[in-house]
Amino acid sequence: MGIAQELIQKQQSIENDRATFESHWQEVAELVLPRSNIFFEDNHTQGEKRTQKKFDDTATLALEHGAAAIESVVTPRGQKWHGIGVDESLENDQEAQEWGDALRDFLFRKRYGSRSNFASQIHECYLSLLAYGNCCLIVEDMLDGNIRYKASHIKEHYFLENQFGTIDTNYRKYQLTARQAVQKFKDKTPEKVLKCMDKEPGKLIDFLHVVMPDEDGDSGTNYISYHVFPDDASILGIGGFRSFPYIISRWVTTAGETYGRSPAMNLLSEIKMLNQMRKTDLRARHMAVSPPLLAADQSRVRKFSMKPDALNYGTLDMNGNPLVRPYQNGANIPASNDGMEQSREFINRGFFVTLFQILVESPAMTATEVLQRAQEKGQLLTPTAGRQMSELLEPMIMREISIYEDYGIFNDGQFLKMPESIKRTEGDYKIIYTNPLSRMQKAEEALGVERTIQSMLPLAQIDPSILERVDWGEYADLMREANGAPAKLFKTKEEMQAIEQQKAQAAQMQQLMQAAPQVAGAIKDVAQAQSYASE
């Protein structure tokens, strides 16, 4: 059996194992994210309607708001949400620290550049995580010194974990039009695709891309890559990657399962119930506004018109009682509304919408209350959203650095030349997160500090010297970090030292000026004494 056939069989086996998840994801897609409902469609029509089964938009809106909320605390646009830290032995090395800052600034400049497409694609990843519990971000080297990011539909990806629970193998079953395939594979394009190019250039064709650890060292890199044409089981290309190009993350995982689960999957029963309640409510309202009509024997009622101001003869009996009347089923619409509102609250809570409305709805809180809210948000978000920093963002950042390193940006003579001190540590550096979620995690420390100061203030009225034990500069730094204020708000240590020196010099000059009359008088007295002695 050839390599191509072996890879195709493995992909099919993994696909069969994932069938239950796909059926679950499709239910979520139908009611929460209809635009991505393509799990069982190979040739879907672009622009087709996919909302036929939806009667309520609460879950869809909650998903959008939840994804925006997660993005705002993990990768907020307009902020440098991570830094590059050097080895602990170099914490006092100014050159190493400046190099880490320069690398961080370079990554953010490239990542949010006009060609990268990062901002929109990372948002798609958060939507996929909250809806399906899995996401895949392709970090692609454009071979011109730039990186392009693409959020890929989870339908295409079949992945495997290694012994440590890290995803290191991915089978991507995807489609290209005949024209795109010719552009991608050039002279290696299969004959069948070339023929299709002449007649149907827009026809979609299946391909398979497999990336796995290169255990045999055949590619000379860490990961080996195969491009396969399943139709004739042929290999279109073999290559390699120093770093894994598919950044795959899960929301939460269950023991024994490779694929993740999502808030939408946990809320699916509530979402389906709300959708059914909304459907029933619409029917009840329609019945209330336009109910069926109850009529007497057809021979006694003439043609009946429902138009405004219509005149209907023969619809009253001899006593003036109507022979036609609306049917009243006695439906309690307000009670139905209460049930739907309760379901909406559960769904919004499940997608973290209510969690992020706390500060907006309660703006008149004290500083201590704000810190306490931030601490609670951090505790609730860290187990799930915090996972994205280790499984989504860190592999992505290391992949970026690996690609740019291949372009030689750290070599001597380049603007990011690696300092000798870092070379001695074998280029050891780490990712330090500075996003709002990290600050929320620090809120507990700040809250403890704030409570301590508040408890000391009454004691200071008895003994003012008790506050002299507090390092107010350190207190200010802790509160700045917890509240997310920019570092430029405070003066640097060097600036403070310069100010202290100026104050000391000014105080010394003032003392000299105050002492000047006395010194001048003393000099005069000495001079007079000397003149008397000389006489």
Image (tube, grey):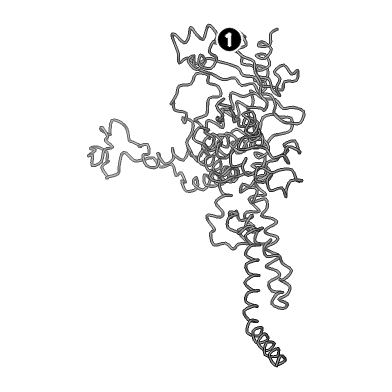
Badge 1 amino acid: Asp
The image shows residue 218 at horizontal and vertical percentages of 72, 16
The image quadrant of residue 96 is: top right
Q: Is residue 313 above or below residue 502?
A: above
The image shows residue 362 at horizontal and vertical percentages of 54, 58
Judge the density around disc 1: few (<14), some (14-19), many (≥20) Cα neighbours within 10 Å: few
The image shows residue 178 at horizontal and vertical percentages of 49, 14
Q: Is residue 143 above or below residue 123?
A: above
Task: Say which element carries label 1.
Answer: loop
Q: Is residue 89 above or below residue 236?
A: below
The image quadrant of residue 321 is: top left
Q: Nearer the viewer, residue 312 or 382?
A: 382
Q: Is residue 388 above or below residue 479?
A: above
Q: Which residue is mark 1?
A: 231
The image shows residue 354 at horizontal and vertical percentages of 56, 49
In the rendered structure, the answer to whether residue 428 lies left or right of residue 138 reads right
Q: Nearer the viewer, residue 97 or 324?
A: 97
